[in-house]
Amino acid sequence: MLIGYTRDGKRIMGTYELIPATALIIGRYEDGELIYDGESRVTWDASETQKEDGQVVFIDEDHEYVLEADVQWRAK
């Protein structure tokens, strides 16, 4: 198995995903502002890995974006 690292040696933790969700509401104020329930329902099966210029966008251990070309893969 290969583990991904940035050029600075930070471990790659995952991919940057766009995940659709429904923010639940309980109503609306008279001025039109929505009143949120404080909960969202996520549709995990519809997540999409994000790409930039055709490259997968990864997230490192500091939650920074790392393009695929900048990831170094090393044997565990």
Image (cartoon, helix red, strand yellow):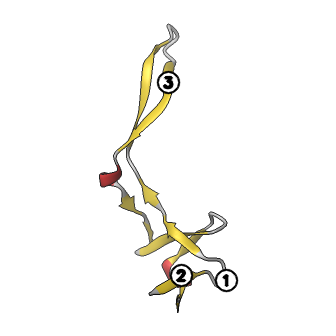
| Location of residue 43 with respect to 30 vertically, above or below | below
Element on which disc 1 rests = loop
Mark 2: which amino acid?
Gly
What is the spatial separation of the Cα atoms under label 2 and label 1, in whole angstroms? Answer: 9 Å
Element on which disc 2 rests = strand
Mark 3: which amino acid?
Tyr
Looking at the rendered image, the quarter that the N terminus falls into is: bottom left
Mark 1: which amino acid?
Gly
Lower sequence index among marks 2 and 3: 2
Q: Position of residue 69 (x, y in %)?
A: 51, 83
Give the residue displayed 63% in from the left and 66% down from the top: 64
Contact, CB < 8 Å: mark 2 with mark 1? no
**Which residue is disc 1 drawn over?**
9
For discs 2 and 3, the disc positioned in front in the rendered view: 2
| Location of residue 18 with respect to 66 vertically, above or below | above
Q: Residues within 10 Å of mark 2 (few under 14, many from 20)?
A: many
Q: Residues within 10 Å of mark 1 (few under 14, many from 20)?
A: few
| The label number, if any, that marks residue 4 in the structure image | 2
